[in-house]
Image (cartoon, rainbow, N blue to C red):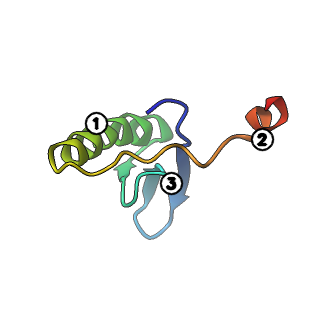
Amino acid sequence: MKNDRINIFYSNEDEGYIADIPDLKYCSAFGETPESALQEVQIAKTAWLEAAQSAGKPIPEPKYRSPIYQLTT
């Protein structure tokens, strides 16, 4: 899965950063910095994709696209 959108935001409740991939349901991770949250969500993405593949579940096509890509298609 390429060009997937990753959201990173600060969570006051968790006192750290959350990264999630909207196209992969429930795929998210926590980090103390935006960079560490990004690294952790990449690990979660790999695990998510491997679990889906092992279970024979379909891998969704990316739906969320940056506005810059929307202008070029």
* Residue at image location 78% in from the left, 38% down from the top: 70
Residue 46 image label: 1
x, y (%) of residue 35? 46, 34
x, y (%) of residue 3? 55, 32
Closest to the observer, 12 or 24: 24
Classify 10 Å Cα crowding around label 2: few (below 14), some (14-19), many (20 and above): few
Quadrant location of the C terminus?
top right
Assign a secondary structure to mark 3. loop
Quadrant location of the N terminus?
top left
Residue bearing the label numbered 2: 67
Cα separation, mark 2 vs mark 1, equals: 25 Å
Classify 10 Å Cα crowding around label 3: few (below 14), some (14-19), many (20 and above): some
Assign a secondary structure to mark 2. helix
Residue 54 image label: none
* Residue at image location 33% in from the left, 49% down from the top: 58
Q: Residue furthest bottom?
A: 13
Placement of 21 over or under 15, stated as above or below:
above
Q: Pick whichever of labels 3 and 1 is earlier in the sequence.
A: 3
Q: Pick whichever of labels 3 and 2 is earlier in the sequence.
A: 3
At label 3, which amino acid type do we have? Pro
At label 1, which amino acid type do we have? Thr
- Is 7 on the left or on the right of 72, as rendered? left
At label 2, which amino acid type do we have? Pro
Residue bearing the label numbered 3: 22
